[in-house]
Image (cartoon, rainbow, N blue to C red):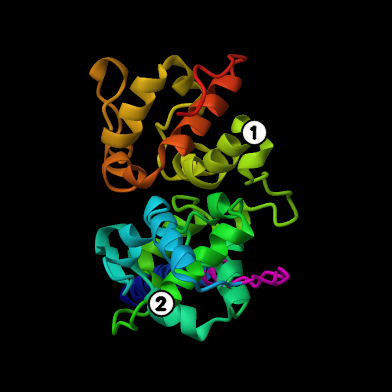
Amino acid sequence: MVNSNMRLLMSSSTNKFENFLLALIGLVLAFIFYVYFRSDSELYKVYDVAIESIELHSNPDIVAEGERLSRIRGCFWCHGQSLEGQQYFAKADRGLIVVAPNLTRKVIEYTPSEFARAVRHGVKRDGTSVQPAMPSFAFYNMSDADMGAIIAYIQSLPVQQGFEGEFRLMPIGWFRWVTGQFPPNAADLIDHAALRPDPSPNGGMVARGRYLAESICTECHGVNGRLRVPNSPDLAIAAAYSRDDFHRLMRTGVSLGERAIDYHMVDVSKYRYIEFRDDEIDALHTYFRSLVGLPPETAVK
């Protein structure tokens, strides 16, 4: 009788443990499915953004300007030396694989207007967002003329074999996405109805500088850009530079007093901003001085 009771007690305890274990496994599986489906649904959210017409001109001067603008805006950094695409981030412990797409193929697959929407609005042909690393929040401010020149340049290039674009979350990446450890979709960072700054040099130095700053510098220094480069200073700090010192910063990455600065600025100065014309650097300097109420230091030379 005692043995029988003991067996019943042990059996009951075993059943309770098994039930607890099954419930725990169920909760873990439910959590895994939740983070997967939430990250998947957010990544592949569809955006309703109208396509804007882009007028293209393929004369040699515009194609050459498109190449210069492509270098200033860093297309070659992420998409490869021939814009063939490249894998630029793949770490299992971070739960992420990122491959920048082959632009020499995308420019054929997309109409010019679709390509412009992908660049400036962060919305692909299928209505989903481009990769979070794409700084469309800055490129949104790019003018039709500049966007058209870049497209004309990429269209002029030979088609490369290259890579398909990919932004793939691995299991740990699902958790990091739903807990906000990755930047959101590029398309979520943009006010798609906002007015763009005036790009015309005829609008004055301040207006021209504002256009360049908002379509280029905000990639790192804007509110949205700080998702990518957290320690970027307020652009108004450039007002402390003399014209010559600011030109040196933009050409060489050497800061005022040669103090240490973020390597991003050093690199973009040497490899991207070297393509700026002197009048564009003057316009930027004038705009940054205007942010703190200072007049232009000198006229454009």
Tag 2: amino acid: Ser
SS for dot 1: loop
User: Does residue 150 appear to the left or right of 81 in the view shown?
Assistant: right
* Point 41% across, 36% down: residue: 278
**The N terminus is located in which quarter?**
bottom left
The question of residue 236 being in magenta is answered with: no
- Above or below, 162 against 57 in this view is below
- Residue tagged 2: 156
Residue type (three-letter) at the residue carrying disc 1: Gly
Q: Which residue is mark 1?
A: 204
Q: Nearer the viewer, residue 4 or 227?
A: 227
Q: Nearer the viewer, residue 120 or 270?
A: 270
Given residues 8 and 114, the one toward you in this image is 114
Would residue 63 appear left or right of 290 to someone viewing this image?
Answer: left
Picture coordinates of residue 82 (x, y %)? 29, 71
Residue at image point 51% right, 64% down: 149
Q: Which residues make up the magenta segment?
A: 40-55
Q: Could you say which disc has been placed on residue 196 in the image?
A: none
| Near-viewer residue (83 or 261) | 83
Assign the magenta stretch its main secondary structure: loop
